[in-house]
Image (tube, helix red, strand yellow):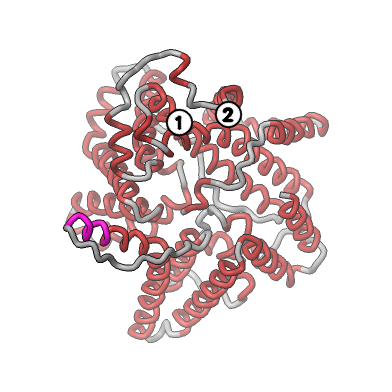
Amino acid sequence: MYYWCLLFIVCVLLYYSVGDKYKGCILFASSIIFIAAFSLGVAVFSLLFTILNYFFGILIEKFSDSQTLKNKLFWLSMFIDVGILAFFKYLNSLFESINSIFFSSGIYSTISLHSIMVPIGISYYTFQALGYLIRIDRGSEKAEHNFFNFATFLLFFPKFLSGPVERSNHFLPQLKNPGKFDKNNIELGVGLFLWGLFKKIVIADNLYFAVSKVYGDANHFTGVPLLIVLIVQTIYIYCDFSGYTDMALGMAKIFGINLIDNFNRPFLARNISEFWRRWHISLSSWCNDFIYNPFIIKFRRWGNNAVIIGIFLTFFIVGIWHGANWTFVILGLLQGVAIVYEFYTKRYRLKYASRLPKSVANTLSRIIVFLFMAFSMIFFFANSVADALHFIALLFSNLHFNRSEIDFIKNKPEFLTALFCFVILFIFEIFNEKGKNLLSIYLKQPVWVRSLGYLTCLVLSWLFYSGIHSFYYMRF
């Protein structure tokens, strides 16, 4: 922890000490050092991947007058990038599936399986590279000729581990026109970082133990423990992932760089379509722009069938983006089913909702969305489809509401504190949804009040620190 703090402080000091011409070099060097601290091999691999895509972008633009050659280069770049991602993320699972088929058929000579380590961050920077090359191929963007800027776009250390999936047309212009030192950016960045730290350490990490306990031995639990985890697992992943996002946004803000926010109060969504416009925004919008929209435009002659197929295709890709496990495929298909259902029943749902008071209709809709996502998250966390089905089958079995049923929660005071803090967080989000921006109000307070708020986040994070050193989405 101290190493990362020192690295970040040195990077900030150097960044604001050099001229604009060298700021990109500082960010690039800091990012490579950051990655190398995790793994030298990953740093070398990600650098080679960056060099490859840097030249692909330049070549696709260079041969834009020769449509045939440009198309060949473009599809070669797509094949290589997707192939690299598939090799690292899906080859082991493919061999395991083939071996399982052999074994169930009574064939015991299996394909040799070698454990392949998945490079950290590969899903995020691969999608960033794909989006960049697609935009160049479309003529929507010029290739970036400054290697340090391009490398920083792919490997910028605040977003390297878990995103967001940045867009080149959003990120690169900020590197070309770097901001000057601004104490307001510094304070806002520090505040965002501490807020994210609070969500991660105080809420997410103290809910994680219960979630990991149940999914680590799913066959051992029934009833109340499963119901508790069903409710808290979505809260856990939200605070863990949005906590990381806030920390990344905060660090980037200190450099005067604005990253795409990944979350916009998703638990206030009134339908699944809206939920995905509020949850993991950078990924869902990327899939919308580069998969769904091109598909339905190309096959618009199919009418609604194109829309339905496009929805399922998009969420299939969202599912397997998370990993080569049938649980993620089912997770994606569930979202597709829900959105297609909403597509066909919108008129009837609005008709029935109009008979209720607006506040009641909105509350019921939000509860239904939350419960559906909580159910879907069973397939997100389960190690296998069998574990997920066991979880669902025994969810309402042996319901004995007594103290022994919560013995699986070993950190009960911290667990309850985490839930209480989430309620406070949710109240803040309700106010923000109603247009009462509490952050703006807070930033207008005297310095001592703001400092007290930052100190409170820091102290609570220190008091409730559980020793967890990673974020859940790092595995994707």
Question: Who is closer to the viewer here, 389 or 447?
Answer: 389
Residue 431 appears in the figure: no
> Label 2 is placed on what type of residue?
Leu
Question: Which residue does the image show at 58% across and 78% down from the upper left?
Answer: 145
Which of the two discs, 1 and 2, labels the residue nearer the N terminus?
1
Mark 2: which secondary structure?
Answer: helix
Mark 1: which secondary structure?
Answer: helix
Residue 125 appears in the figure: yes
Instruction: Give how far across and how far down residue 124 sits, in percent.
Output: 49, 59
> Label 1 is placed on what type of residue?
Leu
Task: Name the mark nearer the viewer: 1 or 2.
Answer: 2
Question: Which residue does the image show at 35% across and 41% down from the upper left?
Answer: 379
Q: Is residue 446 left or right of residue 274?
A: right
Instruction: Give how far across and how far down residue 292 sits, in percent.
Output: 32, 55
Instruction: Give how far across and how far down residue 390 sits, in percent.
Output: 29, 34
Q: Residues within 10 Å of mark 1 (few under 14, many from 20)?
A: many
Identify the residue under disc 2: 425
Question: Which residue does the image show at 65% across and 56% down from the upper left?
Answer: 257
Asked if 62 appears above or below 230 in the picture, the reply is below
Q: How many marks?
A: 2
Q: Splitting the image into 4 quarters, where does residue 171 fall?
A: bottom right
Identify the residue under disc 1: 268
- Range of residues picked out in magenta: 99-105
Q: Splitting the image into 4 quarters, where does residue 139 fall?
A: bottom left
Asked if 380 appears above or below 112 in the picture, the reply is above
Q: Residues within 10 Å of mark 2 (few under 14, many from 20)?
A: some
Give the CA separation, mark 1 to mark 2: 12 Å
Residue 36 is marked as none
Q: Is residue 179 left or right of residue 323?
A: right
Question: Which residue does the image show at 74% across and 32% down from the upper left?
Answer: 459
Q: Is residue 194 left or right of residue 364?
A: right
